[in-house]
Amino acid sequence: MNGEEPIVQLQGVIKRYQMGTVTVEALRGIDLSIYPGEYVAVMGPSGCGKSTLLNMLGCLDRPTEGRYLLGGLDVSRLDDDALSEIRGTRLGFIFQSYNLIQQLDVLENIELPLYYQLRPRPDGRRRALELAERVGLSERLHHKPMELSGGQQQRVGIARALVNDPLVLLADEPTGNLDSRSGAEILELFDELHRQGKTIIMVTHDPEIGRRAERVVRLKDGQIESDQRNVPRPAEARP
């Protein structure tokens, strides 16, 4: 793509799990390149390998065979400490169940990843305030998660994922626990992040996300069944 290097590159990735005497091959020779600024939806039936692929991309698991390059760095064989650092500095995670700390308020939840980087607190607080405003939560800074709606909690999760300015945003069914109105608002926020140039990889069953994404990768039986680009739709045509 215009001479750019992939920001994510999987080369012949195989993942096997040993379950008793049975070997399960969850990924079977995945070759995948994702470029800076792409919005990619990963889709497919249950058991097709989506979760395994997301764990691989999130440096939560390692390939049995093959290579994974993230921002040009081969992370396939890094040790646990190095992978932890990669997760904290190069990746942003957004979860279906939000995974917020109930004892912390909105601002503290957004700031949380910065503590693991030992970033000076004034800088971290400023960054968290900027992101809270960006996701529309500037009036909820000192509310705890239980005082927020599901959509607001997911906005906190998105801001938290952005606080480290990651290379890639990884989202796992981010609208799965939301009603249709809140889900649509979260999808609009992802659209905006895409327009701003963020690289987004989203695992989803939601056909609406599939239609909105720039590219749809479909898995079947641990392999890529199809990899297609969507025809862009004008924003006003979106529900």
Image (cartoon, rainbow, N blue to C red):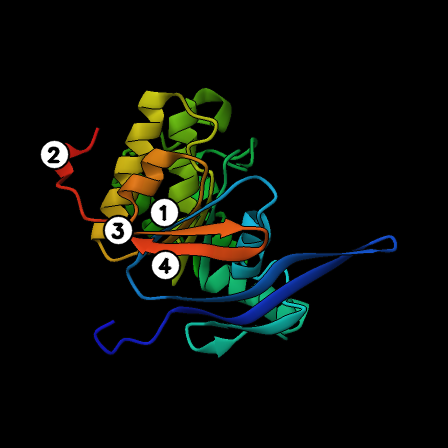
Task: Tell me whether circle 2 and circle 1 mark residues in contact (CB < 8 Å).
Answer: no
Viewer-nearest of discs 4 and 1? 4
Viewer-nearest of discs 2 and 1? 2
The quarter holding residue 5 reads: bottom left
As measured in the structure, the alpha-carbon distance from the residue carrying label 3 to the one carrying label 2 is: 16 Å
Q: Nearer the viewer, residue 104 or 65?
A: 65
**Which image quadrant: the N terminus?**
bottom left
Query: Label 4: few (<14), some or many (≥20) within 10 Å?
Result: some
**Of callouts 3 and 2, which one flags the residue occurring earlier in the amino acid sequence?**
3
Mark sitting on residue 226: none
Amino acid found under the numbered disc labelled 1: Ala
**Of callouts 2 and 1, which one flags the residue occurring earlier in the amino acid sequence?**
1
As measured in the structure, the alpha-carbon distance from the residue carrying label 2 to the one carrying label 1 is: 31 Å
Mark sitting on residue 194: 3
Residue 233 shown left or right of residue 227 in the figure: left
Amino acid found under the numbered disc labelled 4: Asp
Q: Position of residue 90 (x, y in %)?
A: 45, 64
Residue identified by numbered label 4? 165
